């Protein structure tokens, strides 16, 4: 639990480029462009954009957005969809 809090709660060792909030904003931006994205395709896009270290915060970022009711996961198609238009 402490590991997950480190990614949200800032501290002097946190790499802001790999924070849950920043990665979540990138995910929202991509979902606004495409409306629906395959889970693996989104991960590959983020790895290409931010590097392999993104894997640590990918799932916590998706969980964060899901808990805020901003995204929906469709298991049959393995896709993520933006739920509410974020302004």
Image (cartoon, rainbow, N blue to C red):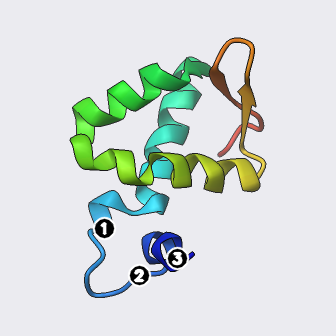
Q: Nearer the viewer, residue 10 or 54?
A: 54
Sequence-first tag of 3 and 1: 3
- Residue 10, numbered circle: 2
In percent of width and height, residue 75 lies at 73, 21
Residue at figure coordinates x 36%, y 45% from the top left: 55
Name the element at disc 1: helix
Name the element at disc 2: loop
Pick out the residue farthest to the bottom. 12
Q: Are marks 3 and 2 in contact (CB under 8 Å)?
A: no
Sequence-first tag of 2 and 1: 2
Residue at figure coordinates x 74%, y 13% from the top left: 76
Is 42 located above or below residue 18 in the figure? Answer: above
Q: Look at mark 3 in the image and give the residue it sits on.
A: 5
| Quarter of the view holding residue 15 | bottom left
* Total number of numbered discs in the rendering: 3
Is 16 located above or below residue 37 in the figure? Answer: below
Distance from the alpha carbon under mark 2 to that under mark 1: 8 Å
Q: Which of 81 and 60 is in front in this view?
A: 60
Q: Look at mark 1 in the image and give the residue it sits on.
A: 16
In percent of width and height, residue 73 lies at 72, 30
- Residue 73, numbered circle: none
């Amino acid at each position: 639990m402490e590991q997950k809090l480190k990614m949200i709660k800032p501290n002097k060792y946190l790499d802001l480029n790999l924070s849950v909030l920043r990665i979540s904003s990138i995910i929202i931006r991509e979902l606004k462009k495409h409306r629906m994205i395959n889970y693996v395709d989104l991960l590959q896009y983020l790895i290409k954009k931010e590097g392999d270290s993104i894997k640590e915060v990918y799932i916590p970022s998706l969980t964060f957005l899901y808990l805020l009711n901003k995204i929906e996961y469709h298991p049959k198609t393995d896709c993520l969809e933006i739920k509410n238009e974020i302004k």
